[in-house]
Image (cartoon, grey):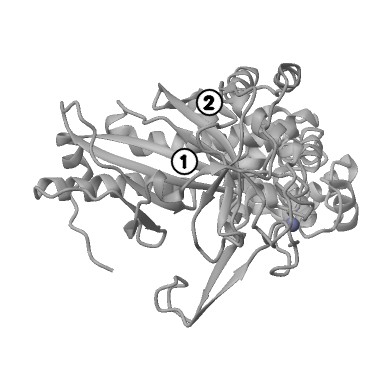
Amino acid sequence: MTTETLVSFAEAMARYEPVIGLETHVELGTRTKMFCGCTTRFGGEPNSQVCPVCLGLPGSLPVCNKSAIEYTIRIGLALNCGIASWCRFARKNYFYPDMPKNFQISQYDEPLCTDGYLDVTVEGKTFRVGIERVHLEEDTGKSLHVGGATGRIHGADYSLVDYNRAGIPLVEIVTKPVTGTGELAPVVAHAYVTELRDLIRSLDVSDVRMEEGSLRCDVNTSLSPKGSAKWGTRTETKNVNSLRSVERSVRFEIERQAAVLDAGARVIQETRHFHEDSATTTSGRSKEEAQDYRYFPEPDLVPVAPSAEWVEQIRAALPEAPSARRVRLQAEWALSDLDMAALRNADALDLVAETVAAGASPADARKWWLGELARRANETGTELAKLPITPVQVARVAELVAKGTLNDRLARDVLDGVLAGEGDPDSVVAARGLAVVSDDSALAAAVDEAIAAHPDVVDSIRAGNTNAVGVLIGAVMKATRRKADAVKVRALIEQRLG
Ligand SMILES: [Zn+2]
């Protein structure tokens, strides 16, 4: 790996203007593949989910998956695109082992959805990201390179191919060039992919999990000298596998390309690979031109011609857009922009919404998810949504605290129990004996014992040292195994001592 010369981001931004573009691939969550009946389930034994069609065996014929077309139209409409009334699939010819047919069925000059936009807000500014096209294609298989140190083909002893993924419907969403972002370019790229992910998730057409590869991103970056009317040569950074990496890959390419241009050299139009560990990119293959793919209309498939009625039906059934929903919830929950951003960053918005729907106050729902539960998710390296606790259970814990059955410390023990699989909050309270001691006679007895056991403390309090009450409260809490209501204990002690 060559070490690149870099220019600091601030210096680069002082002299150059970036243009970015994003190509996002989304694996659709249909039950079966794009052109055959094979299952799309993730994680199966390699090559156990294949058939003559997705392996491209001679004589097999593809048939279009109607759900995949519907999902793609749903995405197109949500991105404010026009929907083609008639379009064809095309064969894209290229030769890699992960392409069992030696060509990919894709769309070329007749995409299903065109000319839309998605608004993203960064630091209070709204950028309208133009959508060039949304088209449908089939996914490739997956290569596994064995024997090398890096898992890449270079240095490997041999390669294995898994075709389970081959033929899964894949939507490609291509932006128009995004200009005028200046130094916000990396953050705008991050915000766009985040907004797109949230939008697609709300449409219920994909689980959009970057780490499982159902959302994959290629990031184009170019630089031109400030004030120049001509855009620079762009590079395409492939397979950027996290939201954070989208931002880091743009930043790195800006720093690298600025150094190339400063040295009077030319940026080479090429594919680059992003490395998560070092946040750098390295040169891949030089980019194919469209003519290299020798596209032609797929002769084995009939054209796709969605009727206007069907498209309008799909439009009428679109859910509230995530951006509109955020505005509504922020007002309903009376949150600041910062509070809202924290919820979103923690990926807790839906969890909090469901907890509120289950009866908790917005403040309580936020407190438990962003506090105690976020801490536990963090400690165990789990996503918040994957913790083994439901919003309904969190709402019940909040309710038990509000009713005085639990204090915060006992509530944390209840969460422990629920997370450990001991059942619902009420079962955990019963099984672990966690309810607050609110029985007045039991508390009164514990208070009397504490007073009798600490005559010197009592004298000190009577002499005016009110802080010493803490010692008695502590003794009562210890005697009740911290299950007493501290406010009540203080009141009882003050009552006893006049
Ligand atoms: Zn198949």
User: Residue at (65%, 37%) from the top-left corner?
Assistant: 201
Q: How busy is the neighbourhood of tag 2: few (under 14 within 10 Å), some, or many (20 plus)? A: many
Q: Which residue is mark 2?
A: 114
Q: Are marks 2 and 1 in contact (CB under 8 Å)?
A: no
| Local SS, label 2 | strand
Q: Regarding ligand 1, which quadrant of the image does it lie in?
A: bottom right
Measure how far apart labels 2 and 1 are at the Cα level: 14 Å
- Split into 4 quadrants, where in the image is the C terminus? top right
Q: Which residue is mark 1?
A: 23
Which label lies toward us, 2 or 1? 2
Q: Nearer the viewer, residue 136 or 437?
A: 136
Displayed quadrant of residue 403: top right
Q: Is residue 106 left or right of residue 293?
A: right
Q: In the rendered image of this protein, does residue 309 appear above or below residue 455?
A: above
Q: At which x and y percent is residue 310?
A: 75, 21
Q: In the rendered image of this protein, does residue 281 appear above or below residue 23?
A: below
Q: Nearer the viewer, residue 140 or 243?
A: 140
User: Residue at (69%, 69%) from the top-left corner?
Assistant: 46
Q: At which x and y percent is residue 34?
A: 70, 46
Displayed quadrant of residue 189: top left
Q: Is mark 2 within 8 Å of ligand 1?
A: no
For badge 2, the amino acid type reads Thr
For badge 1, the amino acid type reads Glu
Any part of residue 452 in sight: no
